[in-house]
Amino acid sequence: MSRTARSITLCTTLMCAAVVTLPCAAQTSASFKLTEATINNGGNPTQGSTLTSSHFHIKLDAIGDGVVGAGLASASFHSDAGFVADYPPPGEVAGLRFASKTSLLWNDERSVGTYDLYRDLLTNIPGAYGTCYQSALPSASWTESPNPPTNSGWFYLVAAENRLRDEGTKGFVSGGTERSNTAACP
């Protein structure tokens, strides 16, 4: 091995040894200090650590559990639970009602990107709880134009679809089980 190669090898070994043996120090300033080594004491929330200073306060849940709740925010930053906070799973649409003979309304659902409207004849209840009648409705309303067949009527169900295009439930039957959706809207 050449003298230059030995010098480089020796210098690299010394630098690695120096890096390994040096103690690690947390970032510190007048307004920020972090000295924690584990998150929440390895999963014990009652004995966990709370990061604080005069300018911030952070408390994390146990390892393996979700850190949820209100997001951290100020004029210059925002931090929350991440992906799920921005794209929550779709929930059940509530408050489906007629505002007039032809105008259907329902309550906004928090995760919504769009709504899917299902319709079928009353004589087909329970069946599949309606087939896809309108998909990707942008708002919590629909105006119906045709009349149902003579001596019959229609029923309507609405499902929310979040921005990831996951469709929520059609609701629950009186016994508490979820209504099936064997043919979701495209």
Image (spheres, rainbow, N blue to C red):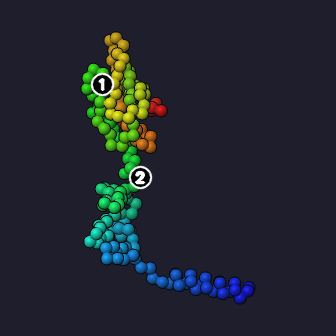
Task: Identify the residue position indicated by label 1 in the image.
Answer: 103
Helix, strand or loop status at disc 1: strand
Dot 2: what SS? helix
Identify the residue shown where x is 60% and y is 84%.
Answer: 13
Q: Amino acid at mark 2?
A: Phe
In percent of the image, x 56 and y 83: which residue is there?
Answer: 15
Using the rendered view, name the quadrant where residue 148 is placed.
top left
Quick one: which residue is furthest to the right in this view? Answer: 1
**Which residue is nearer to you in this view: 127 or 88?**
88
Task: Say left or right for 108 vs 26.
Answer: left
Q: Which residue is mark 2?
A: 83
Residue 110 visible to an observer of this rendering: yes
Residue projecting furthest to the bottom: 3
Residue 9 placement (x, y as % from top left) = 65, 83
Is residue 13 depicted above or below 124 in this figure?
below
Q: Earlier in the sequence, mark 1 or mark 2?
A: 2
Q: Is the residue marked by circle 2 packed among few (<14), some (14-19), or many (20+) residues within 10 Å?
A: few
Image location of residue 59, percent across then percent down? 31, 65
Asked if residue 164 is positioned above or below residue 34 in the image, the reply reads above
Query: How many other residues sit within 10 Å of disc 1, few (<14), some (14-19) or many (≥20)?
Result: few
Question: 182 or 80, which lies in front?
Answer: 80
The percent coordinates of residue 3 (x first, y second) are: 71, 88
- Please name the residue shown 33% across and 73% down the image: 32
Q: Amino acid at mark 1?
A: Ser
- Can residue 179 be seen? no
